[in-house]
Amino acid sequence: MIPDHTVVKFLKRTEPLFIHLAVSNVDRHPISVRGFGVKIDDRIDCLNIYILKAQTEKVLSYLSSGNGVVACLFTDGFSNESYQIIGRFINYKASIREDLEILTGYRKSSLKLFPKMYAKFPLSTAICDVISYKAEEIFVQTPGPYAGSKYQKGEATNDS
């Protein structure tokens, strides 16, 4: 499995976790959108990222005309521990009732840092889609001596 135990634990335990999904088109012009939750499918090294439906069409158009590479930056809202996980687009789907727990959890954790913003921004399956991609590489993005380096499985990447 590409995301090892350390990274999976980070993705599952971190609150609040800030997510930025980026793709590029055929001209290598990038687009980045905010992610509103992550669900991990350990069986196939798949990450499922929740984005706003209003942004799905543009993301998919970039993916279809580009090289199909998805890069997501995951950052701990308190410590700034960060990982960039890069991989290949698999598919997208509308979020379903079972996804509401992830969206609700993301919103609650984000309220810790931005109570006024998220109090007015309810997340639901009605406004989010899911972009799925297969994880292939991980890079450390935590500010400090390891920033930008390829992640070595099981190694600590911050000084705390």
Image: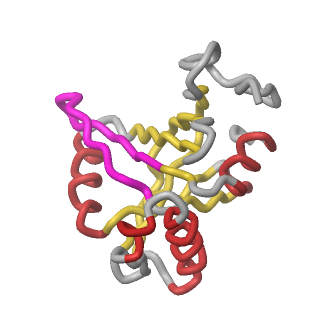
**Quadrant that contains the N terminus:** top right
Q: Residue furthest front?
A: 116
Q: Name the image quarter holding residue 131.
A: bottom left
> Which residue is rendered at x = 56% and y = 59% of the image?
38
Q: Name the image quarter holding residue 114.
A: bottom left
Residue 82 inside the magenta-drawn segment: no
Residue 24 inside the magenta-drawn segment: yes
> Which residue is rendered at x = 62% and y = 36% of the image?
81
Q: Residue furthest left?
A: 27
Q: Pick the residue in front: 133 or 9.
A: 9
**Prevailing secondary structure class for the magenta stretch in the rendered image:** strand
Image coordinates for residue 7, horizontal then vertical, percent:
71, 41
> Which residue is rendered at x = 43% and y = 56% of the image?
35
**Quadrant that contains the C terminus:** top right
Q: Pick the residue in front: 120 or 96.
A: 120
Residue 96 as seen in the image, left or right of residue 30: right
Looking at the rendering, the stretch of residues picked out in magenta corresponds to 19-35
Image coordinates for residue 82, horizontal then vertical, percent:
58, 35
